[in-house]
Image (cartoon, rainbow, N blue to C red):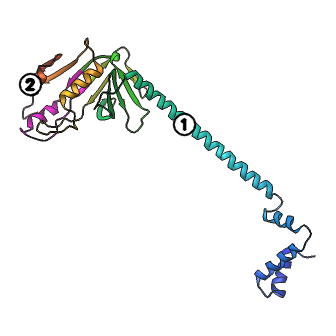
Amino acid sequence: TCQPDELASWLNAHRFHNNAMDVASFLLTCTAALPNAEEISAHLMGGGGGGEATRDDTSASADGNNGELKQEESKEDTTNTNNGDETTTANDELGETITSFTSLEVSCINPRGKFLLSLHNNGIMLQNPKKAEEHITITKEAVEHAVWFRKPEDYKSLKQLKEGSKKPIPGHMILMCLEDNGITFRKKATKQICFQLPSYAAPSVETDEDINEEEWYNGLNSALLSEQKTITRVLANVDAQSSKTKKGGYVFQAGVGSSG
């Protein structure tokens, strides 16, 4: 008797003169001449004794992986659905959005960061632009009082603006003090929300795109306050005369000289 490798080496060296392709063709021809050649060929092509089992195992593994993927997709769908439900509930609570005041970027001091501000008939929403599911909703009933004011350094910028300048005017700060225990955001409780409005277009610039100071004031009044509550408007001598006549405000002497 001889081993398969010995037979293949002998045939290659002595009969087919080192032509491996001819050796392989000869052995396949021998296999085809055996009884049940088709079953033997299928068995060999399947990879040996465990051919069918191997295919079944592979198929089962693939099905298992698909099952895991479907399960993960189901979890994501559920999460997205829940987030969508939360946003829908918040919108229902706040009412319709006030025209022109939708998803406007503001800089928040508390909580700190950039948010998209939308004004509604019964409150406001601040939404994280990078994580839509992270948002703050504040209804009219939740606001104890609100204050409208400028940062001191913005008054210095205003004084330096020349007549006819097209440079944007810094937006006002809005401070909202909330009723009772306030809200919880990012696992922290807060009773105050403070943010700066976007810059206003200069009076010399004619545009329908930017919202001016009075439009912001009126929009916030509609969204947050009622007849019993108004925004406390803190003004300085350099503010426009029309602003000083508004109800609920008072004027102070701002120190905006060359020393700051």
Asked whether residue 136 is in view, the answer is yes
In this orientation, which residue lies closer to the viewer: 109 or 205? 205
Q: Residue at x 18, y 16 (%)?
A: 248
Q: Residue at x 6, y 35 (%)?
A: 258
How busy is the neighbourhood of tag 2: few (under 14 within 10 Å), some, or many (20 plus)? few
The quadrant holding residue 214 is: top left
Judged from the image, the secondary structure of the residue bearing numbered disc 1 is: helix
**37 within the magenta span:** no
Which range of residues does the magenta coloring cover?
147-174
Left or right of 101 in this view: 89: right
**158 within the magenta span:** yes
Tag on residue 226?
A: none
Amino acid beneath label 1: Asp
How busy is the neighbourhood of tag 1: few (under 14 within 10 Å), some, or many (20 plus)? few
Q: Quadrant of the C terminus?
A: top left
Earlier residue among tags 2 and 1: 1
Which residue is disc 1 drawn over? 77
Q: Position of residue 113 (x, y in %)?
A: 33, 35
In this orientation, which residue lies closer to the viewer: 234 or 248? 248
Q: Residue at x 80, y 81 (%)?
A: 23
Judged from the image, the secondary structure of the residue bearing numbered disc 2 is: helix
Q: Quadrant of the N terminus?
A: bottom right
Q: Position of residue 164 (x, y in %)?
A: 7, 39
Asked whether residue 188 is in view, the answer is no
In this orientation, which residue lies closer to the viewer: 257 or 248? 248
Left or right of 63 in this view: 128: left
The quadrant holding residue 215 is: top left
Q: Is residue 112 above or below residue 36?
A: above
Tell me, yes or no, whether the two marked residues, 2 and 1, touch with CB atoms within 8 Å: no
Which residue is disc 2 drawn over? 241
Q: CA distance from mark 2 to mark 1?
A: 54 Å
Amino acid beneath label 2: Gln
